[in-house]
Image (cartoon, rainbow, N blue to C red):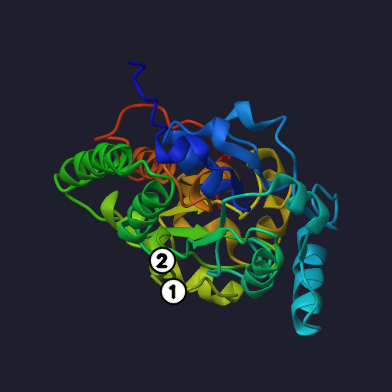
């Protein structure tokens, strides 16, 4: 008698990810082959390079100054115009069983309501999984949510357990610090935006305090006076969607600020540009890498490993 072959639930699924973080979660669950389509922003892991791109943004990879990008986004949102478009024809051809997206941020992915409406119009409507984290715990919950939707619950639990263990190792080590320095984290430079959602929590776990951060709340525009009044001892530049090289292009904007050269972080040579796109603004498995990067920047005396993907600006000249 021939043995019946039973397919695992996840082996039949076709997944479209509209978020870089979701793509990384699916890959970390060992289901890269299940991804039949990804967003234009998805760039990790390398194995997804040849996946069909189902979204488009008019200013993706543009060379516009940051202030112009911010103005364009504000104008589009004010006019109720979508920042992203979804290739409906391609989506129908891909026939996904699951679409992973988010409704946390209007600037980070296609409009959630539009995605739900488009999904409902497909011949075989897929399950839409919403990822909208505001904390480290929420990010881990999203990983488990994706794992459940894709039939990899045990794999998801194991992944989250390993990530949580790394977080706790950082927390325990940072607890031995004798100081908790003021570490301001900027999510945009021109204009200035403070950190929000999970990032202030990352700073706390790494042994610092972000006096401008909005823990578990959206980041907001701040004034130059607010940054100067905060007197950061450490300043982390992690612009949303920018790598280190692009972030460094905006440093001149900061250097033109009155009082910039007297900020403690500038005087002490503790201004760091990091890859916000790959790490801090991407709430997936590499959010723990982000924490470990922060820990090395905030407490180098405890975390000796050189932080990956971070560039330290030169000290200010003596005044």
Residue 280 drawn at (x, y percent): 49, 50
In the figure, 34 relative to 136: above or below? above
Residue 101 drawn at (x, y percent): 57, 59
Residues packed near mark 1 inside 10 Å, few (<14), some (14 to 19) or many (20 plus)? some
Single out the mark in the foreground, 1 or 2: 2
Q: Residue at x 51, y 38 (%)?
A: 12
Quadrant of the drawing holding the N terminus: top left
Q: CA distance from mark 1 to mark 2?
A: 7 Å
Residue 292 drawn at (x, y percent): 36, 39
Report helix, strand or loop for mark 2. Answer: loop
Residue 180 drawn at (x, y percent): 26, 56
In the figure, 275 relative to 55: above or below? above
Q: Nearer the viewer, residue 63 or 269?
A: 63
State how many labels appear. Answer: 2
Give yes or no for contact between labels 1 and 2 (Cβ–Cβ under 8 Å).
yes
Report helix, strand or loop for mark 1. Answer: loop
Which residue carries the number 1 mark?
217
């Amino acid at each position: 008698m021939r043995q019946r072959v039973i397919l695992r639930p996840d082996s039949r699924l076709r997944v479209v990810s509209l978020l870089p973080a979701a793509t990384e979660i699916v890959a970390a669950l060992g289901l890269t082959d299940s991804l039949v389509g990804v967003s234009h922003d998805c760039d990790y892991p390398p194995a997804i390079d040849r996946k069909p791109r189902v979204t488009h943004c008019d200013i993706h990879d543009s060379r516009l100054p940051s202030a112009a990008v911010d103005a364009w986004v504000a104008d589009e949102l004010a006019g109720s115009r979508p920042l992203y478009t979804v290739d409906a024809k391609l989506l129908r051809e891909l026939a996904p069983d699951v679409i992973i997206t988010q409704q946390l941020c209007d600037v980070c992915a296609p409009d959630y309501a539009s995605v739900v409406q488009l999904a409902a119009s497909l011949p075989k409507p897929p399950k839409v999984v919403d990822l909208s984290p505001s904390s480290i715990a929420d990010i881990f919950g999203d990983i488990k949510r994706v794992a459940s939707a894709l039939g990899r619950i045990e794999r998801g639990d194991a992944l989250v357990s390993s990530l949580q263990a790394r977080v706790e190792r950082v927390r325990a080590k940072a607890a031995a610090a004798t100081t908790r320095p003021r570490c301001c984290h900027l999510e945009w430079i021109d204009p200035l935006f403070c950190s929000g959602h999970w990032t202030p929590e990352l700073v706390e776990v790494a042994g610092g305090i972000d006096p401008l951060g909005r823990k578990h709340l959206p980041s907001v525009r701040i004034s130059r006076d607010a940054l100067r009044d905060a007197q950061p001892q450490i300043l982390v530049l992690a612009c949303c969607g920018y790598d280190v090289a692009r972030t460094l292009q905006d440093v001149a904007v900061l250097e033109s600020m009155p009082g910039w050269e007297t900020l403690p972080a500038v005087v002490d040579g503790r201004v760091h540009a990091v890859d916000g796109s790959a790490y801090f603004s991407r709430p997936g498995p590499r959010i723990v890498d982000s924490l470990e990067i922060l820990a090395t920047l905030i407490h180098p005396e405890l975390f000796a490993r050189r932080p990956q993907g971070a560039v330290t600006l030169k000290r200010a000249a003596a005044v």
